[in-house]
Amino acid sequence: MCEGLWQCTSEVISSPVFRNLSFLFGVLVAVVSVLSARATAKKKQTADLLSSTRADEELVAGLRCLSELHNRPDANIRQYASDLKASSDEAKSIRYVLNHYEYVAVGLQSGIYDEGMLRRASHNTVVNLFTHARPFIEALREHKHRPSLYQEMQCMAEHWQELGQPKKKKRKRWGVV
């Protein structure tokens, strides 16, 4: 039995049980810190992607071109997948946009980006892009004999479409609901 506060404290601190519990607590804190840093890094990467996407004039022009081609009553978007039209400005724009979102989908699958954040910001763009570009993608797959072309972007768009429009959350900001 210990006598006095300091002697009791000394015995508890020097005990193997206390050392083991201290060690486990330290490991737990380290694991939580790593997971927190990883989540923060994903959100930072996603914010950077969204920012660069909005600043990419070629991407914005490509999305606009694809939308115009889709809405044209006489348009045949499949023709831009052929060798005859492959070097046209429209075909280049379509491929640029599809390649961009294919890279985004691969990054999302690899865990680089935060899917919730990306989906809240780009749901309609991705779903509409795939809807508008689907005939082009199918023609390109047939023409090139490569059924996997743009499959990651397709999976992302179809998954997001199944999930539906992201719900807006009421958030408490600056102490106000």
Image (tube, rainbow, N blue to C red):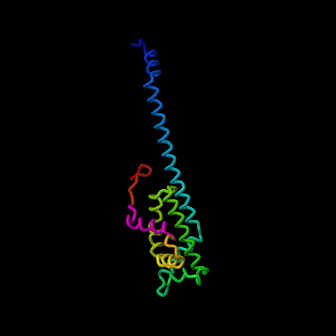
Q: Nearer the viewer, residue 91 or 70?
A: 91
Residue extending furthest toward the right: 87
Residue 129 in percent (x, y) is at 48, 72
Q: Quadrant of the N terminus?
A: top left
Report the residue at 55% width, 67% height from top.
Answer: 100
Left or right, residue 149 beside residue 88: left
Note whether 51 is above or below 129 in the view shown: above
Left or right, residue 24 beside residue 86: left
Q: Nearer the viewer, residue 8 or 105?
A: 105
Residue 176 in percent (x, y) is at 40, 51
Report the residue at 48% width, 46% height from top.
Answer: 35
Residue extending furthest toward the front: 145
Report the residue at 60% width, 79% height from top.
Answer: 89
| First to last magenta residue range | 149-167
Note whether 45 is above or below 138 in the view shown: above
Q: How many marks?
A: 0
How would you classify the magenta stretch by its main secondary structure? helix
Q: Nearer the viewer, residue 63 or 20?
A: 20
Note whether 112 is above or below 82 in the view shown: above
Report the residue at 45% width, 28% height from top.
Answer: 20
Residue 6 in percent (x, y) is at 46, 16
Q: Nearer the viewer, residue 16 or 65?
A: 16
Left or right, residue 10 beside residue 52: left
Whether the magenta-drawn stretch holds residue 55 is answered as: no
Residue 123 in percent (x, y) is at 44, 66
